[in-house]
Each structure stands twice: as structure tokens, then as C-alpha cells.
DNA sequence: CAGCCCTTTGAAAGTAAGTTTCATCCGTGG
DNA sequence: CCACGGATGAAACTTACTTTCAAAGGGCTG
């Protein structure tokens, strides 16, 4: 393997575990088995010797080493150290809660609520931790300087895309969102240098969004991608890649935690953009808020 | 050395570092040199190999091993792991987080990210804490038993409403969402006993949503409200009131944390409903996921 | 559909790290 | 002055980690 992309070589700002789970789908089967063991119990993995871990993952030591390299470590000892550090930092999970796991069949509503909230909150926190401010800055720069911003997303990510469009619009940026691929493609074809195209896809494999970004990029627009998987196909058409850190579980196919994580990133970008021109953005927000005031009853004052 | 003191063999409750500095005077000179290095910079020591550390302490590997045993470790790798964990624990976040407050004008992106994530995560957690499982249960009952579910929401809450509709739809419930008041009113007029109308409004003052719920209620439908303010006007037309716990701040007029809180509640309801008929819901989710598979490229694995 | 190429994988060889053994050194007390 | 015992490092040894390589599988192309 001559290429060894080594995503985020030096430091994953936030969590190594988070980083690994993001990379998980891009790993080979045998490496995935190792990754799952590591993610499931980092502290335990740190205690094991490489041979031990290899056996537990039903593979060879060589594969474990390959796994280490795949996630950006130099070798096994380094991984061990990092895992130990990581495990120590995180507060041991309140055991009642199913961390990143599925919701048990017999769960009552209170348990469901606790589990969901826990995972949602985690997704938000971990996403923020691993978010690279430098990349955000670049994206903010691009958006601030853009003549026009197109936001693309399908399915659940479509809501997020739409939300971002609306936010940008509210602070006076020219932004569009298209629920329909054809219209989106048409729009992308009209983008040019200096414009920005933002593509949102949790899995990073949504061909519609990829195609549209491809088109946008071909026209000279700056492309920004928001995905959970740093090595997914969509990142190939991206100038800037922002990642979320949600670990969806079986029942959560409805993409629950991922939306929240995506929204958090969107919020950061939004505030970043707004902060660049504070008075104007604030004014715009006030004006737009005023515009919907007539649609509110009770003049805003809360009733006793 | 037949005796091998092995102080506190199994576990030093508090800090390993503290433990070592306590033992320091009782160690032999060469071991003391090692100990001093370790105490001075545990993280650095954890990174070194035994040979490296021995050299740095101007002694031999054998002495380092002796030192490990003296402080109760089995060997050097174990010491390394423990040191890494220890070091990680003591470096705690600087916490320049602005709790619930506005984002300071001069804030850099890293601060912005930390602040937003913190507030978002809090909103999610606090919402879950104050969410009443009993009321959720009633709402779930109503939805499970409903012939039809209408979800209403305007502006930012509209996204959430739409998201809920889509989720319910995906597990085979008959649900609708209308971006437009007129259509919504029409639909509400067609609801009847046993049907459910869900209204989402952060402020609880959105007259459009209130009117629609009023209409729905008049027709005999069960009305559910999701708002941040338990005494806002909208609650007057509600059979069941669910509340979020988001504290929006000035700049966050774009309704940032509130959306996340709302989504969390929606997720809870969704899972609650899905859990009532697990096999069918799971099947439905699988089928719908399959339906969009053709729109995904790659099998998720690695890049081209 | 055969053949090629690329990827993945584990066995085995090779290297480095960690551990044990043992001889030496040095200070102490008889 | 010699015997003794702890402290120490060199070297032998063991285990852990890393690299290499060949085989097997899978998919793409002609």
C-alpha cells in the first residue's frame, strides 16, 4: 500500500476514538474488526499486547499494525499510549445508558429518552472537539467572499442544507438550496470562481450530492463538504472537508444524532460568518425577526 | 533482590504521580533519577522507550525496570500506559466557555465552536432531563393509535416538523407536513377523533401554528405541542404539552440550540413509536434505506 | 469468461524493546 | 583487612513489535 493517505496525520484535535469511528467504514474488513474492539473498549485495548489484540480480532499482528497506520499512528505502542490517554480523559459512561448502542427492546420511555439525549449530546460535543478551526476559518472566508452560496443535501441532510441556506439568507448572504437534483445541477452549472458550493451527506456516498458538487467544482466554485466519514467518496470533490462525529446505531437509521452534529457545525459556520460583519448581520436578523412579528401573538411578552 | 517491596501492589487510588513522588526518598539513587524524570513530565516519559528513558536518567534499562517494580507496576509497558492515562487526566479543558451567554465580539472560531457546542449539548441534556416520560407515553399512545398525524411548524420549527413527518412516514405511519398555512388549515379541518395534530413553535406564539391547532382540536383531533415556554399561548390549544429547555442568546436568534432540543424530543417520540412495533418499524426502515441505495456510490469502503 | 491487476491477508523472518541474570563495584561492620 | 550486602550495568535472553513476501480473493477489462 504505497499511498497510505494518513488522514489528519499529526493530530486529530479531538478524540482518537471519534477519529477511528469516522474512519471505520473506510477500513478493510480485518482492520474494521480491530477498530471495533478498540472503539468498544479503548482502555482494555490499551492494556493488551499486539498479539493479544490480533487474536481477539481474529486476525494477525500485521493487520493490527496496518490498522495503526490507517488511523495515523506510527505503530502499536503509540496507539496504546494514545488509547490509554483517551480512555482516561473520558468520563466513564453512566452504565444505564447504552453508549452508541442500540436501544434495548424492553426499554421504557425514560430509558429511551436518556439514551437518545446522551448520544445526541455526545455527538454534538465530539463533533465540536474534532472540528478543525483552521478549516472552518477557510470555509468562513470562502462564504464571506462568495458571490453566491449553493447548499446541497438529500434526505435527512436536506433539512440541514435547507436550514443553512435559510440562516445565510437571513444575514443577507445570497444562498440557495434545491430539494431537487435537476434544479441543483442547473444551479451548480451557473456557479463560477469565487462562489461556494456546500454539500452535506452523512455517509458521504450520496451520488446526487457528489455529482452536483463535481459540477460546481468544474465551474470553478469552491466546494465544501460536511460528512461523518473523512474518507468517503464525497471528499474527493471537496476543497474543504468538515466532519461530524456521530455514531449512528441500528435503530437510528433515521439519522438522528448525525443531524444534530451537522446542525452544530452549521451553527458554527453561521456564527463565524455573521461575526465577520457583526452590525450588518445583527441588523439583518432584527429586520427579519420584525418581519414575522405580526405572525406572533402576545407581543412577545410571556403570559403569566 | 529477594524482597521486592512492591508498595501498594494493586492500585494507588489517587494519582500514580503522587504515589511515585511519595516513594521517591525511599528509592535508590539511580531509581530516583528515573522517578524525577517521570514526575517532571509523565506524558513525555510515556512517549519514551525504556532504553530512551534509561539513557535520559543516565542509568541502565535494568534500573528502570527495578523502578517500575518499586512503584508497584509489573513492567515498563504498564507504567507507560498508566502514565499516559495519568497525564491525560490532569490536563483539563481551559474552559473559556461562555455559558448560555452571547458570543463575545472578539471571539475566534475555536471559541465560537466551543461555546456553541457547549450550549447545544446543554440544551439537549436539559431538555431530556425535564421531559416527562408520562406525557411522552401519552403522546406516543396517541400517535400509535392515530389514523393520521399532521405536523405543523413555521420557520425554523418548520424544519423540525418536516423532519418528524418524514420519520413517521418512514416507519409506515400516515403523517403530513404543510409548509403553507392555508394548506395546513385545510388539512386540519379534515382531521377527526383519533387523529393527532402536532404543533411545533419555539416561542409558543406563532399564530399560524396556533390557529391550525385550534382548528384541529375543534375537529376532535388530539393536539400535541412542542415549545420552549410552558405557559405560552400555544399551550392553550394543546392536549399534551412537551417542552424543550433551550436558552437562546442574542446572536442565536436564528434559533440554534432550540432546534437541537426540539429534534431530540422528536427523536424520543419517534423511537417511542417505533418501539411499539419493532419488527414492522425495523422492516420499514430497511425497506426505505434499500430504496435510496441506488443513490449511493461505493459500498462505503475506501476511495477510488 | 478468461486473464490481469489490485487489494487484502497472514506466515514467517527480522528488528527492536523489555526483562532477567550475573558479575562487579562500593561502602560497611566485624 | 576481609566478608557481606545492596546497588548497578553489561550482556544474555525473551517477548513484543515490524517488515517482507507470497498466496488468495475479487473485480474489472478485453
Image (cartoon, coloured by chain):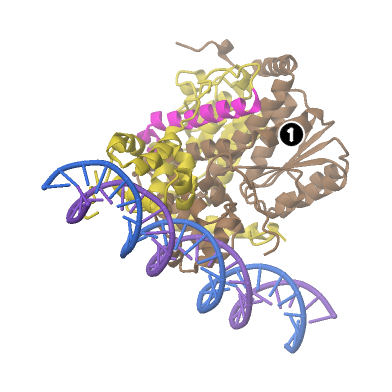
Chain colours: A brown, B yellow, C blue, D purple
Tell me which secondary structure the magenta stretch mostly adopts.
Answer: helix
* Image location of residue A251, percent across then percent down: 48, 51
| Picture mark count | 1
- Residue B22 shows in the view: yes
Return the x and y of residue B63 as percentages of the image width and height: 37, 50
- For disc 1, the marked residue is A138
- Asked if residue A179 lies in the magenta stretch, the reply is no
**Relative height, residue A221 to residue A63 (above, below):** above
Q: Which is more toward the observer, A27 or A207?
A: A27
Within the image, what quadrant is residue B83 found in? top left
Name the image quarter holding the C terminus of chain B: bottom right
Name the element at disc 1. helix
**Residue B121 on the magenta span:** yes
Q: Residue at x 73, y 49 (%)?
A: A209
Counting from the top left corner in percent of width and height, residue A192 is at: 88, 39
Q: Residues within 10 Å of mark 1 (few under 14, many from 20)?
A: some
Quarter of the image with the N terminus of chain B in it:
bottom left
Q: Is residue A212 left or right of residue A29?
A: right
Q: Residue A174 or B59: which is nearer the viewer?
A: B59
Decide which of A84, A199 is in the foreground and name it.
Answer: A84
Residue at mark 1: chain: A
Q: Is residue A258 left or right of residue A147?
A: left
Between residue A204 and residue B59, name the one nearer to us: B59
Q: Is residue A86 visible?
A: no
- Percent of width and height locating residue A260: 56, 38
Vertical position of residue B25 compared to residue B31: above or below: above
Q: Which residues are magenta?
A: B108-137
Amino acid at each position: 500500500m504505497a499511498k497510505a493517505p494518513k488522514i489528519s496525520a499529526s493530530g486529530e484535535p479531538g478524540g482518537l476514538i471519534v477519529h477511528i469511528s469516522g474512519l471505520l467504514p473506510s477500513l478493510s474488513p480485518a482492520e474494521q474488526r480491530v477498530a471495533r474492539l478498540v472503539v468498544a473498549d479503548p482502555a482494555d485495548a490499551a492494556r493488551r499486547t499486539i498479539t493479544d489484540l490480533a487474536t481477539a480480532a481474529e486476525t494477525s499482528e500485521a493487520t493490527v499494525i496496518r490498522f495503526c497506520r490507517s488511523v495515523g499512528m506510527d505503530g502499536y505502542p503509540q496507539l496504546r499510549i494514545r488509547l490509554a490517554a483517551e480512555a482516561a480523559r473520558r468520563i466513564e459512561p453512566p452504565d444505564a445508558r447504552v453508549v452508541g448502542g442500540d436501544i434495548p427492546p424492553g426499554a421504557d420511555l425514560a430509558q429511551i429518552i436518556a439514551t437518545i439525549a446522551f448520544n445526541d449530546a455526545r455527538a454534538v460535543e465530539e463533533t465540536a472537539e474534532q472540528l478543525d478551526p483552521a478549516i472552518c476559518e477557510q470555509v468562513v472566508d470562502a462564504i464571506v467572499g462568495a458571490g453566491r452560496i449553493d447548499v446541497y443535501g438529500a434526505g435527512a441532510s436536506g433539512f440541514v442544507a435547507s436550514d443553512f441556506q435559510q440562516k445565510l439568507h437571513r444575514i443577507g448572504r445570497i444562498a440557495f438550496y434545491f430539494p431537487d437534483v435537476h434544479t441543483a445541477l442547473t444551479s451548480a452549472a451557473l456557479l463560477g470562481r469565487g462562489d461556494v458550493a456546500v454539500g452535506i451527506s452523512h455517509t458521504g456516498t450520496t451520488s446526487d450530492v457528489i455529482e452536483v458538487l463535481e459540477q460546481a467544482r468544474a465551474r470553478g466554485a469552491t466546494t465544501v463538504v460536511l460528512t461523518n466519514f473523512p474518507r468517503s467518496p464525497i471528499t474527493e470533490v471537496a476543497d474543504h472537508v468538515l466532519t461530524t462525529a456521530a455514531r449512528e446505531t441500528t435503530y437510528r437509521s433515521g439519522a438522528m444524532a448525525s443531524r444534530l452534529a451537522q446542525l452544530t457545525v452549521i451553527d458554527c459556520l453561521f456564527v463565524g460568518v455573521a461575526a465577520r460583519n457583526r452590525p450588518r448581520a445583527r441588523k439583518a436578523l432584527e429586520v427579519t425577526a420584525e418581519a414575522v412579528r405580526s405572525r406572533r401573538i402576545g407581543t412577545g411578552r410571556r403570559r403569566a
